[in-house]
Amino acid sequence: MQPYLIAPSILSADFARLGDDVAAVLAADADVVHFDVMDNHYVPNLTMGPMVCKALRDYGITAPIDVHLMVEPVDALVPQFAKAGASIISFHPEASKHIDRTVQLIKDHGCQAGLVFNPATPLSYLDYMLDKIDLVLLMSVNPGFGGQKFIPATLDKLAAVRKLIDSRGLDVRLEVDGGVTIDNINAIAQAGADMFVAGSAIFNTDNYADAIAKMRQQLAL
Ligand code: DX5
Ligand code: ZN
């Protein structure tokens, strides 16, 4: 497993020229495309759906697409995103009536499955699920918008999940999403994360390669 993955959130990309902007961030050494799906129901914002994911694939984007579903209900969108070229599909457990069934649905459609935890969502959802998923995504902001400030209590939560994963010897990614910057990425990695979503800290600069290189430098310390 690659030790650290950088996953730019395309929520902060230029939607008017999305294909080019996603290609540019990948050429700047990003590993994964983080694709935020908001439904104006589970979160108070509205973004993009499976058609946009498919359009990126048709445009020639071959990197893994990490679909973060902030939607309720979840299940109907799973086959659509799988068909549209999603690699990983993650959802918020409280947005699904049958969490185990939704995870199984994602896997049956050939994608990796992740569970997402809001800052106040308890980790108990992992009790019977950690060995059935590929990824745990901890939100370090309340979901719905890019450009928010990292909530420091996430560091302890990351450490708790890292302990759970390692004590069971599982091959599960630990991703963090929200307010990740060059300045805090090292501390976030120290706490146990190995996959980093960053939207504004990459797309709101005029040199993506430089921002990503600086993040990797911090991760190498
Ligand atoms: C928030 C989204 C995040 C967000 C991250 O609901 O899930 O992926 O776009 O953006 P930054 O890095 O700007 O906090
Ligand atoms: Zn996200």
Image: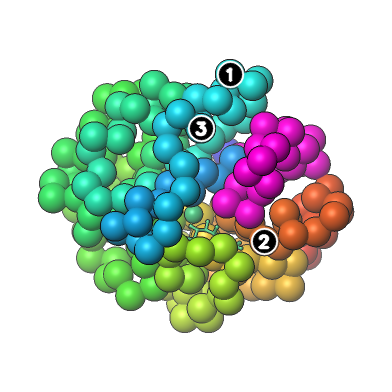
Separation of residues labelled 3 and 2 (CA atoms): 20 Å
> Which secondary structure, mark 2?
helix
Q: Decide which of 118, 220 is in the foreground and name it.
A: 118
- In the picture, measured across the screen, residue 8 lies left or right of residue 175, that is right
Residue 218 lies in quadrant: bottom right
Label 3: which residue? Answer: 52
SS at mark 3 in the image? helix
- Quick one: 206 or 27, which is closer to the camera? 206
Side of 104 relative to 193 (left or right): left
Q: Quadrant of residue 50?
A: top left
Identify which residue is drawn at 77% across, 38% down: 24
Residue 78 x/y as whole percent: 31, 33
Q: Residue at x 86, y 52 (%)?
A: 207
Q: Quadrant of ligand 1?
A: bottom right
Residue 74 vs 152, above or below: the answer is above
Q: Position of residue 99 (x, y in %)?
A: 19, 47
Q: Earlier in the sequence, mark 3 or mark 2?
A: 3
Q: Nearer the viewer, residue 152 or 23?
A: 23
Magenta span:
4-32
- Dot 1 or dot 2: first in sequence order is 1
Q: Amino acid at mark 2?
A: Ser
Q: Which residue is under mark 2?
A: 200
* Amino acid carrying mark 3 in the image: Val
Q: Nearer the viewer, mark 3 or mark 2?
A: 3
Eyeballing the image, is 213 above or below 159? above
